[in-house]
Image (cartoon, rainbow, N blue to C red):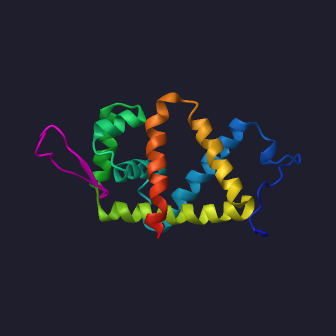
Amino acid sequence: MASSHPVSPSGAGGETPADWELGLVLASAHQVWRARTATALAQAGFGDLRPPDVQLLRLVEGGVATVGELAALFTVSKQAVSKVVDTLVGRDYLTRFTDRADRRRAPLALTPRAREAIRVVGRRREADQRILRDQLGEAGVRALRDGLAAVVALAPDQEVVLALAQRLADAEPARSG
């Protein structure tokens, strides 16, 4: 099926992204993915959210409930995550509540505003994936996912993130249906 979206535009020297070094292609793809996410968020009225904020919200949606758990996944300090969480609470994307069983725990929960922002990103992702399926076919998209998962798996400490990503991916059909 023909697509109006070129797979690999030529550079000045005639080379295409397919000719680039793998690291450059991965970095460029990441920048494009983030930019498309940021644009979709801004157009929907969520310009105060950055793509990493949405990643944090998706982790909370997936069951990561506390600042400590988020800090462990992002491999940063609790203070760094707490600062971001405070900002997201202040912008009405997250709420904190006290765990009655353990008052030291402050589980996080998404607000309706956060759920809508996640839906906006989900719609952008679905549209992008349709474009990729048109260009690469279903087997090509599956191979792309497998290849990217292999790159992520080069960092063995990312097993928890991979497991959560798989759980979120498995939930996608139910969410969009």
In the image, residue 177 above or below residue 107: below
In the image, residue 47 above or below residue 162: below
Q: Which residues are magenta?
A: 91-109
Magenta span includes 96? yes
Give x and y (percent) for residue 159: 47, 35
- Asked if residue 71 shows in the view, the reply is yes
The residue depicted at 26 percent of the width and 49 percent of the height is 108
Magenta span includes 111? no
Tally the marks.
Answer: 0
Q: Nearer the viewer, residue 142 or 105?
A: 142
Give x and y (percent) for residue 18: 79, 46
Give x and y (percent) for residue 72: 36, 33
- Asked if residue 41 shows in the view, the reply is no
In the image, residue 49 above or below residue 76: below
Horizontally, is 60 left or right of 133 in the view?
left
Q: Main secondary structure of the magenta part?
A: loop
Q: Quadrant of residue 36?
A: bottom right
